Each structure stands twice: as C-alpha cells, then as structure tokens.
Image (tube, rainbow, N blue to C red):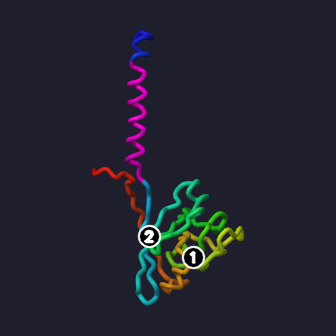
Amino acid sequence: MRLSAIRSRLPLLVFAALWSFALTIAHAESVGAVVTVRSANGQGHEFVVEVADTEERRERGLMFREELPADGGMIFIYDPPQVAAMWMKNTLIPLDMVFVDTEGRIAHVTRRTTPHSLEPISAGVPVSAVIELKGGSCDRLGIRVGDRVHYELAVTSTSSAPR
C-alpha cells in the first residue's frame, strides 16, 4: 500500500480506534456485592456494596466520599484470609468496620471510626472480608460479633444503553 493511501485513510482509522475504545468504556462492567448480615435473632440486614477488587480500589476505599447510603458500603475480600488492617486516611465520614472470619461470622466490629485517622484498625485475627458501612449502622441495626455474613458478587453494567 502506498504512503499516500495510508495518509488518506488515517483519519478513518483513528476514528475507528477511538469509537471502539468509547464503546468499551460505555459498556464497562463493575463488580458489586449484596451483603446480608443475619443477627442471632434471625433478623437479616441487606447492603448493596462496592467491591474493592483491584489494588487501586483497595488503596482508595471510601476516601473522599462526603456521604454513604444507609444500605451502602464497600467490601474488601481476602483470599487467602489474612490479618487485615484498615485506616481512615482521607476518609471524610465515620464508618463502621465489620471484620468477617473464615467461617462467615463477624469476628470484630469497630464502630464510628474517626475520619482522617491514621491509626490501624484490625480484628487481630485472619479474616476473609472487611465490610465498611455508614457510621452508626451497626448500632442502629443491632449488628454485633457472632452474627452471620453472606455475600454474593454481582457484575453490573455502567452503560445506560439498553442491551
């Protein structure tokens, strides 16, 4: 192919590449989870949370958020389980942190954490997940150590276009 032919098609090739990239972004998918906490009295509480499933999301967590829905939050999943330590750097709102052991029970709850604190927050034992909820949720709903936790991951499309 001659150079002049390539030059004449270059705008079309660039457009096609950009269009393909735009479609990929428009139909990007993110992972969320439905978390159910079942209290000792059998009462269930359901939360729709974001999943910190990449290193970047784990590092950022809920930093810079000015509000959080009453039934929202974020889950950090550890496979294999580990002694997890969290902090509140650049986190503007108080959170409740729920540490879930390897049997699916709450091992530790830290209530109403202090925004911006650099103090490590940990259960001190290996956990399979940490769930961050709006501060005060655990007291309001009676969530405590020993309650059962179940979560299901769900892939959601960020596209507003019908499929």
Residue type for callout 1: Asp
* Residue 17 picture location, percent across and down: 42, 31
* Residue 72 picture location, percent across and down: 47, 70
Task: Check disc 2: other Cα within 10 Å, few if <14, some if 14-19, many if 20+.
Answer: some
Q: Is residue 99 left or right of residue 46?
A: right
Q: Is residue 158 left or right of residue 50?
A: left
Residue type for callout 2: Tyr
SS at mark 1 in the image: strand
- The residue positioned 37% from the left and 47% from the top of the image is 27
Q: Is residue 118 left or right of residue 46?
A: right
SS at mark 2 in the image: strand
- Measure the alpha-carbon separation of dots 2 and 1: 17 Å
Task: Check disc 1: other Cα within 10 Å, few if <14, some if 14-19, many if 20+.
Answer: many
Q: As rendered, which of 136 and 147 lies closer to the eye? A: 136
- The residue positioned 43% from the left and 65% from the top of the image is 33
- The residue positioned 46% from the left and 85% from the top of the image is 39
- The residue positioned 39% from the left and 46% from the top of the image is 26
Location of residue 50 with respect to 124 vertically, above or below: above
Q: Quadrant of the N terminus?
A: top left
Extreme residue in the front direction: 66
For the question of whether residue 138 can be seen, the reply is yes
The stretch of residues the image draws in magenta is 9-29
Q: As rendered, which of 62 and 146 lies closer to the eye? A: 62
Disc nearest the viewer among 2 and 1: 1
Location of residue 25 with respect to 35 vertically, above or below: above
Residue tagged 2: 151
Q: Quadrant of residue 15?
A: top left
Q: Pick whichever of labels 2 and 1 is earlier in the sequence.
A: 1
**Magenta residues, dominant SS class:** helix
Residue tagged 1: 96
